[in-house]
Image (cartoon, helix red, strand yellow):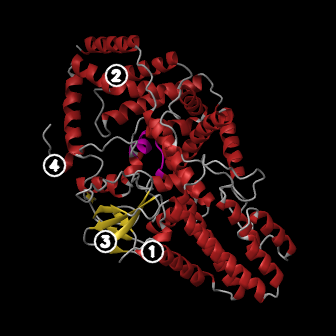
Amino acid sequence: MFTCRQIYDLITEYDEGFLKTSERRQFESHVVICPPCRGFLSQMRATRDQLGRGAAPEFPAELADSIISAFQEWKSQQR
Amino acid sequence: MIAYKFLSSGAIGLFSRHAWPTPTADAPGEWVRVDGEIQQCLNGVHACAKERLVEWLDDELWEIELGDPVLEADEELIAPAGRLIRRLERWNDACARAFVGHCVDNTVALAATLLIRAGCEDQAEALTASRSRPDAELKMLQLARSLEDEQTSPIRFLADVARLERGGRPELDEEAPTSDAGGPTPAALAANLGYVCAHIGAQLAEQESAGAYDQSFARERLRESTWLAEKLQLGR
Amino acid sequence: MRRRSEPHLNRDTDDGRRYTAQRNGKHNPATTSSAKPSDDRSATRLAERELLARLRAGDEPAFRQLLADFGPAMFRLARVYASDSEVAAEIVQETWVAALRGLQGFEGRSSLRTWVFTILANCARRRAKMEARSAPLSSLEALRGEESELDCFFTANHSRWASCWTTINTRWDALPEDALTTQEAESAMMEALRSLPPSQSAVIALRDLEGLSSDEVCSLLGLSVGNQRVLLHRARLAIRRALLEVLDDKESRS
């Protein structure tokens, strides 16, 4: 049975699918019976969800314009 | 095959975070199927038999029908498909608390027996008496201090359990929180204390007879599951 | 786009089936919730070849489409590397200029996205060196954060709770919906991202902000699988710590 410290150390390996089946079993068995680890697991997932959900910064219109100009210049140089 | 599945509040898998389709008044929940090879913990619908209930405790208990072929691993069943049949309402907060109470009672009784065998009849009596007191933790701590090896004694452990039962964390200075904010759900606490009590019991067994831990632990977990299955009146 | 099953279009694996296994086999489906859905590789490859041809021919609408597809993600990434929007914009601009210059020579061994993002990463790193970013300092901060976290565990020789959490760790999936989406949480998150050692911020930005796969990020940043995982692990823990502080503050105030 893993300790909480091991859960803390292994959580990314767990999420990435790099634990062997027996290790995965031990990981999950521990989390089921350990409220702080349940909390920790949910916190890590919420963190990842939040990162994925983060508001994308506004793409500046001027930037788009200047990139298009660069393209047009490159294109004209191709000929 | 009919089996049992625990889910977190809202019929959500604890690890998969999958939101399970729930049954209606007329029909079971829709079939949930997985593609590819069935692999324990990696791929497949997971469920448990009633002998293993206590190892998977969570907020909601459901009866689940599993599609063939069912892979029977030690602690769980894995299948390529499953559907929820009905929610077993008898598993609720009150039942979870009753389960905890039962486990702690059992462990206190075991510890008291050991004390008697060690010639500490007075302490055994004090321990049993402390169990139902509101200041159980305090009494148990006092008791532990009066014994040799106070830190490692099962009484000390039981004092921790008493604190956990109240929603606290062991050995922390502040008062155990009285609100639910952030604390475990009754089901999560039941999962925790069922385990801890079986662990304490197994340590007691080990004290009596070296090497007895594993068998005692397994036996106690089975006993817990059996007790719970009966309390929930699970048929098969 | 009609599906084609031509494995030879799949440059990275000789067997399309094996690619599928890598994508699906290892992962618990729900834990990759933040990753984008896996493309049908053959269809994507075909689409990319057509796109490349059109770009090389100077097709402006094709380029505008590409900019619309990649631009926001590139800008978001550059913002993580750079100290402000202006610098981020410059990085993105430089990246596109370099990409256009290299377009004819691009052999398609990696995907277009990988290639463009590699250029971005290189531009950002070059700039970071130029601005003499105090990388050692952020490493120190990161280390301090990691070490302080170890106080949250009982020691390994505790008689009853060896290596257990001392804290309760509330469940964040039970929080009110907007608890993590406040301005405060958002700023704390961005600040934490910016304070990470560059190696960690690059990995977490590409994996968790942009949803690139583990394989893509390894090839993009030239990391081994294990190395990438360690960086990701430490970065995620740091962001969690930052959010924890925001939530703790809230609780103690309310």
Q: Are marks 3 and 4 in contact (CB under 8 Å)?
A: no
Hey, what amino acid is under mark 3? Ile
Labels 3 and 2 share a subunit: no
Per the model, the C-alpha gap separating discs 1 and 4 is: 52 Å
Q: Are marks 2 and 1 in contact (CB under 8 Å)?
A: no
Q: Amino acid at mark 1?
A: Ala
Marked residue chain, label 3: B
- At mark 1, the secondary structure is helix
Residue plotted at (77% across, 83% down): B115
Tag 1 residue: B229
Dots 1, 4 in contact, CB < 8 A: no
Front-most of residues C31 and A62: C31
Residue density around tag 4, few if under 14, some if 14–19, many if 20 or more, within 10 Å: few
Per the image, label 2 sits on a secondary structure element best described as helix
Residue C92, above or below B48: above
Write down the residue under mark 4.
Answer: C5
Q: Amino acid at mark 4?
A: Ser
Q: Which residue is mark 2?
A: C101
- Going from the N terminus, do you reach mark 4 or mark 2 first? 4
Chain letter for mark 4: C
Q: Residue C159's x, y, as percent? A: 74, 68
Q: Are marks 1 and 3 in contact (CB under 8 Å)?
A: no
In this rendering, the answer to whether A71 lies above or below C186 is above
In this rendering, position of residue B152 left or right of residue A64: right
**x%, y% of residue B17?**
41, 51
The magenta stretch is C215-225
